[in-house]
Structures are given as structure tokens and as C-alpha cells.
Amino acid sequence: GESVGLHLPTLSVQEGDNSIINCAYSNSASDYFIWYKQESGKGPQFIIDIRSNMDKRQGQRVTVLLNKTVKHLSLQIAATQPGDSAVYFCAEITLNRDDKIIFGKGTRLHILP
Amino acid sequence: NAGVTQTPKFRVLKTGQSMTLLCAQDMNHEYMYWYRQDPGMGLRLIHYSVGEGTTAKGEVPDGYNVSRLKKQNFLLGLESAAPSQTSVYFCASSLPGGLASYEQYFGPGTRLTVT
């Protein structure tokens, strides 16, 4: 059957290099953002999150940057490893009377040996 | 601790057939969700539940029904399957309250094909 990742943009990165994956979000009022990693045949896995009142947050080998002026989110992965091969997608959350979460379509990260 | 599990992993249905997808979680989470994932699209929320005995519609509820009779289980039913319901279905669970409800733990998915 067709993979859900078949039509996604692909980023190819040499093993050991840094990767930057981008996401444009839609709602300037979104309060919270999450990056997920989805390996082939598995469910999405939470990587890192950031609140809208922050512009940078760091985790282990990952950094998320938020630019609210242009509604842009990026995920930086340092020293990319073969195990980082996956589809990465962002999610934006708007917290109000009707909380809403919108998931991005994703980017496939391909690690070159 | 198995986390979130889904049954079955794969299924092929003929148009008009019915089936139930089972999701189970052993983390004592209050919130549970059913999503579908289609090529070229982000995850879309079908139905969700904020506690045992309660369910609510998500973004794309038509053609699906759900039940949450036990806290640890969330069932997704298709009464009369259609080819448009061919997709990969993910269940997720989370703790309640504010941002914690968005730190969702996902199951491995069920790939459903309707012919």
C-alpha cells in the first residue's frame, strides 16, 4: 500500500551534519507548538515543544526556533545520525474556548551514509 | 508498560462492511483520540474522549462512531466502510489539562484498505 510519506518533501543530509527542518504555521494566535518524529510503520513520537512566548528551546541534540513575525517554526538536529531518518512534522495549538490542534504535512529526513 | 496499543495492525474491507478498531492504553490517561493520516495531509482528528463514558466529535467524524466504556479502551467503529476511509488510523492518549493534553502518546497505527 502507499506510504503516507510518499508525497512529502525530502531533506537529505550527510550523517554527522546538522539538519534544519522548517514548518510554516497558519494561525498567528497559536499558543503552543510541537515537533513530532514519525519513523516508518510507527506512530508519531513527541520530540520537543515550545510556547508562543518563547523564541528558542533546546533539548538533547534538538533545538526549536520560533519566529512569530513570519509564522515560522524550525527544528534543528545536531550531528544527524542514521536513527534520525523519519518524517518530522509540526503541530500548532490554539488554546481558547475550543482548543484546536493542526498538524503539518511533514518533511522526510533522509540520512546519507 | 506497553503504552498505547492498537488492534488490528492491518485490515482489508469491502465497501459496506463494518469493523471496529481497538485502542488500549496502560498509562491511566484520561484523554484518548482517534486520528487518520492520509498521503500528503497532516493528521486529522476523528473523535476524542476526555474520560470514561464521554466522547466528542473532531474534525472529520462522519462515517465513524466511537465508544469509551472503560478508561483504558477507546473503540473506533466503521458501520459501512467506504473507499474514502482507506487510511492509516492512529490512536493517542494523554493526561488531562492545558498543555499536558497535547503531549500525546501515539499507538503504532492500523492500516485500513477499503476496496
Image: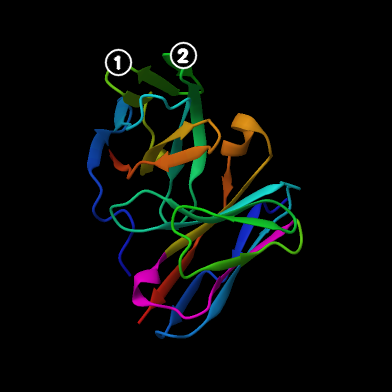
Quadrant in which the C terminus of chain B appears: bottom left
Which residue type does callout 2 highlight?
Met
Bounds of the magenta span? Answer: B72-87
Residue B103 visible, this angle: no
Mark 1 and mark 2 on one chain: yes
- Residue A20: x %, y % from top left: 30, 27
> Residue B107 sits in which quadrant?
bottom right
Residue B93, percent from left and from top: 63, 48
Instruction: Describe the element under mark 2 as helix, strand or loop.
Output: loop
- Report the side of A30 relative to A110 (left or right): right
Q: Which mark is residue A54?
A: 2
User: At numbered mark 1, what does the secondary structure look like: helix, strand or loop?
Assistant: loop
Residue shown at the point (41%, 13%) measured from the top left? A55
Q: Nearer the viewer, residue B59 or A23?
A: B59
- Measure the C-alpha gap from mark 1 to mark 2: 13 Å
The residue shown at (31%, 23%) is: A71
The answer to which of marks 1 and 2 sits earlier in the sequence is 2
* Chain letter, disc 1 residue: A
Q: Which residue is mark 1?
A: A69
Q: Residue at x 29, y 30 (%)?
A: A22
Badge 2 local density, few (<14 within 10 Å), some, or many (20+)? few
Q: Does residue A72 lie above or below B88 as drawn?
A: above
- Mark 1 against mark 2, which lies toward the viewer? 1
Q: Is residue B109 above or below residue B1?
A: below
